[in-house]
Amino acid sequence: MPIATSVANLFARNSVFVGTIFFGAFAFGITYDKVTSAWWDSHNRGKQWADIRSKYLQDE
């Protein structure tokens, strides 16, 4: 149980525990956003405005 004791000692201070939770939530949010955006772009490739813009806009 040395790992559990080390983790318990690390999180003994409330500021470390709360900071870890906030950082984890922030990192998870960014990662989730990037992964879902990448999946959406690959799933809808060729159907988005960025892909078909050249068909509808003329160069001046």
Image (cartoon, rainbow, N blue to C red):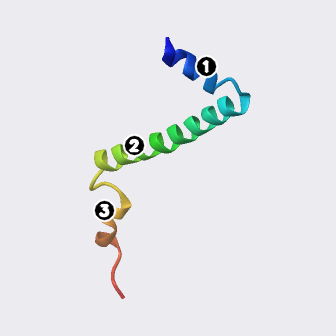
Q: Position of residue 36 (x, y in %)?
A: 41, 42
Disc 1 + disc 2, Cβ < 8 Å = no
Query: Furthest-bottom residue in view?
Result: 60
Q: Which residue is mark 3?
A: 51
Q: Which of the 4 quarters of the picture holds residue 18? A: top right
Query: Is the residue marked by circle 2 packed among few (<14), some (14-19), or many (20+) residues within 10 Å?
Result: few
Pick the front one: 51 or 12: 12
Q: Which residue is mark 2?
A: 35
Pick the front one: 30 or 24: 24
Q: Position of residue 45 (x, y in %)?
A: 28, 52
Relative to 30, 52 lies left or right: left
Q: Which residue type does callout 1 highlight?
A: Ala
Q: Which residue type does callout 3 highlight?
A: Asp
Query: Is the residue marked by circle 3 packed among few (<14), some (14-19), or many (20+) residues within 10 Å?
Result: few
Question: Mark 1 or mark 2, which has the lower sequence index?
Answer: 1
Pick the front one: 6 or 57: 6
Q: Which residue type does callout 2 highlight?
A: Val
